[in-house]
């Protein structure tokens, strides 16, 4: 299990390679890379967080995924700071003996990152106006399917 919150970009290919290296029991690796959308005239998205608190929340979400599915490994990377459209913002990867567990765990992680992770997002438009991004009902509905 690994969680990283960072300003620096990441290489999804290198991260995937490192995730499964040396474990011949892994039969499936699933990953998701999220990008900053530039729709609606967005020139920058800035992500803020509380260091320490955010990492702890992400670690708890990741630990829950490991409780629910037989994962050999997982990785969550979330970027913070100002990001332009097209920039990589989040990366989730899961590794398991079987694909179903890897797919489901990756979906679970993304659904809960969107709803429970303490990040604050602000979009800045090309004209300089800024607005905080509110949570979406669709994200809450997606996360609700994982209720125990």
Image (cartoon, helix red, strand yellow):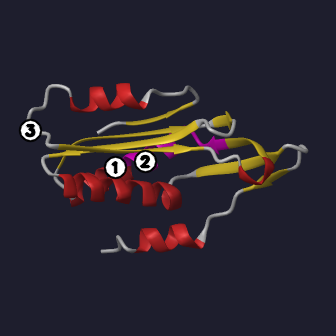
Residue 115 is tagged as none
Task: Specify the quadrant that holds the C terminus.
Answer: bottom left
Residues under labels 2 and 3: Cα distance? 26 Å
Which of the pair 61/30 is nearer the observer?
30
- Which secondary structure lies at badge 2? helix
Count of labels in the image: 3
**Magenta run includes residue 50:** yes
- Which secondary structure lies at badge 3? loop
Quarter assignment of residue 45: top right
Task: Specify the quadrant that holds the N terminus.
Answer: top left
Which residue is at the far left? 25
Please report the bounds of the magenta region as a residue range. Answer: 47-59
Q: Mark 1 points at which residue?
A: 62
Q: Name the residue under label 2.
A: 58
Q: Is residue 106 above or below residue 31?
A: below
Quarter assignment of residue 56: top left
- Looking at the image, residue 137 sits to the left or right of residue 23; the answer is right
- Which secondary structure lies at badge 1? helix
Residue 25 is tagged as 3
Residue 133 at x, y = what percent? 70, 57
Residues under labels 3 and 1: Cα distance? 20 Å
The reply to whether callout 2 and callout 3 are in contact (CB within 8 Å) is no
Residues under labels 2 and 1: Cα distance? 6 Å
């Amino acid at each position: 299990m690994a969680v990283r919150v960072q300003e620096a970009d990441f290489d999804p290919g290198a991260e995937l390679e490192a995730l499964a290296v040396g474990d011949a029991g892994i039969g499936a690796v699933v990953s998701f890379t999220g990008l900053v959308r530039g729709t609606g005239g967005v020139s920058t998205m800035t992500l803020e967080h509380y260091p320490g608190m955010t990492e702890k929340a992400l670690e708890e979400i990741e630990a829950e995924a490991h409780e629910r599915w037989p994962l050999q490994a997982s990785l969550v990377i979330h970027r913070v700071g100002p990001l332009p459209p097209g920039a990589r913002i989040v990366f989730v990867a899961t590794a398991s003996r079987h694909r179903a567990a890897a797919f489901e765990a990756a979906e679970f992680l993304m659904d809960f990152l969107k709803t429970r992770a303490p990040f604050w997002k602000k979009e800045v438009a090309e004209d300089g106006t800024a607005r905080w991004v509110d949570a979406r009902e669709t994200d809450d509905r997606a996360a609700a399917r994982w209720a125990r």
